[in-house]
Amino acid sequence: DRYGSGNKALYTFLEITFSGGWPNNVSKVVKEVSPFYVIFFAIYVTCVVFGLVRIISALFLSETMQQVNRDSEIMVMKNAEKGKRMKNEISALFDAADTSGDGLLSFQEMDDMLSHQKVRAWLAELGVNPEDTQMLFDLLDDGDGEVDRDEFVTGLLKLKSEARAQDLLPVATNCQRILAHCKTLRDTVDTIAASMSPAASQQLTVSTA
């Protein structure tokens, strides 16, 4: 009743392929017709169930991974576009704040800029604290008492971003170097102090007095 016609045989093979129907659909043929059919069914199950189905699964997985990569590329492009737009907005803010037109922001110009409520609200939305003008100016200034466009844009973008490990690592490294120099300096001072005789120390004290 399972192999009497082409349609029945096709449906039976469909059951064998997708439901693991060896006990019900194959066992009877092997036991009642001929045991040599086990070779045919073994080859069929190996090639179709364990081969073709795995290939189809791999194709679906490959398509899924390609879609994920495309989504990642789209996300990178959106982030790049967002960063470019942010730079343009900050640069436009610099132009509006540079009332003198010399391409530099003085402390007074920055203080005037931060007096506008919309500017303060926009900077707060970026995560930049606009409350202390002097602190913000010192963070953006490289020490010459004025802030140029590059310092303004780059500084605000850095203040907007969260601190990352690659940003904190140089700070930690420099702190370790400063600490090592301080220890070396202390050891040198201790050595010099220990090598001085009491008389020389007393003479140095008298001459200093």
Image (cartoon, rainbow, N blue to C red):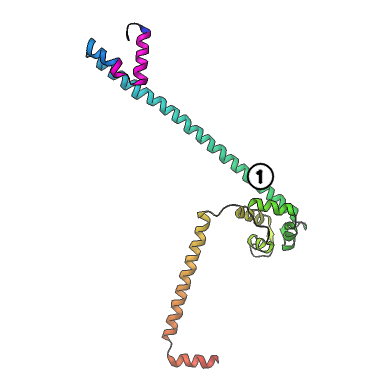
- How many numbered marks appear? 1
Query: Percent position (x, y) of residue 189?
Result: 46, 80
Query: Percent position (x, y) of residue 56?
Result: 41, 25
Image: 206 above or below 159: below
- Magenta-highlighted stretch: main secondary structure? helix
Q: Secondary structure at mark 1?
A: helix
Give 154 or 53, whichever is nearer the viewer.
Answer: 53
Image quadrant where one finds the N terminus: top left
| Residue 122 visible at all | yes
| Range shown magenta | 7-24
Image: 121 above or below 197: above
Image: 124 above or below 57: below
Give 189 or 122, whichever is nearer the viewer.
Answer: 122
Left or right position of 139 against 4: right
The residue at the far right in this view is: 100
Query: Percent position (x, y) of residue 94?
Result: 71, 53
User: Looking at the picture, which amino acid does disc 1 mark?
Assistant: Arg
Q: Is residue 76 magenta?
A: no
Would you name the residue on which mark 1 appears?
85
Q: Residues within 10 Å of mark 1 (few under 14, many from 20)?
A: few
Q: Quadrant of residue 208?
A: bottom right
Left or right position of 49 against 101: left
